[in-house]
Amino acid sequence: FKWSHTQFDLSIRYILTGGTNQSDLAEVVKIVNKSPTARIGISLFEYDDFDLNGTAGGDTATKLNSSTIRQTDGPFGVTVGATPIPSIMEVAGFPSILNNLIDQNVDNLDPTLTTFGPGDATFGMQWNVGIDGGQTFLMSKNKILVVPEPATMAALAIGLAAVLARRRRKA
């Protein structure tokens, strides 16, 4: 994706790799300040709403460190990491972050919200950057999705059934 403005050029490149039970979606954002001298200020936002395991209600999301958030639902998980480190990250339940981003007000994410769940977890990252004249800003993110292979899921289901059957016999 490429977009050009009188003050800057923006490009976004996506790279998808993966295998049987893990995928990696890399995203690279490049912003070039076209002015030879003027500094421009830009705020970039990343919003994620993964409904892991095919449901919206059982997810838990946690800020792991200053640049990484992990969301899980049972054996399913996604880890999103970014460089440079975001200015602010927020974890919350749907639709809190989305409503703040699409309203008519200028909003910043809330850095005090660092974990949510279980429920319909969402998260966001925000970069507030100044790009000097003639300079380039690069930002990259990786979204690594882990999906258990069918044999692992079957083994978990059989183990759970055995535990439930044992409880019924004791009752």
Image (spheres, grey):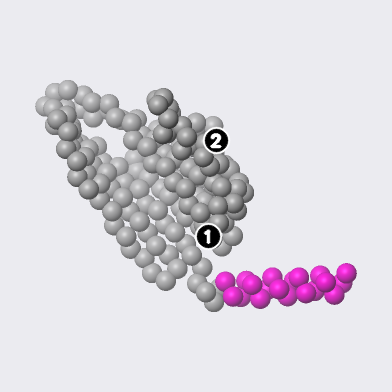
The disc at residue 54 is: 1
Examine the image and state in which quarter residue 43 appears.
top left
Counting other residues with Cα less than 10 Å from the Cα at mark 2, is it few (<14), some (14-19), or many (20 or more)?
Answer: some
**Residue 169 lies in the magenta stretch:** yes
Residue displayed at 41% across by 48% down: 81
102 shown above or below 119: above
Residue 122 x %, y %: 50, 44
- In this picture, residue 169 sits left or right of residue 128: right
Q: Amino acid at mark 2?
A: Leu
12 shown above or below 43: below
Residue 93 x %, y %: 55, 41
160 shown above or below 28: below
Q: Main secondary structure of the magenta part?
A: helix
The disc at residue 152 is: none
Which residue, as the protein is rendered here, is positioned at the far left? Answer: 36
Q: Nearer the viewer, mark 2 or mark 1?
A: 1
Q: CA distance from mark 2 to mark 1?
A: 25 Å
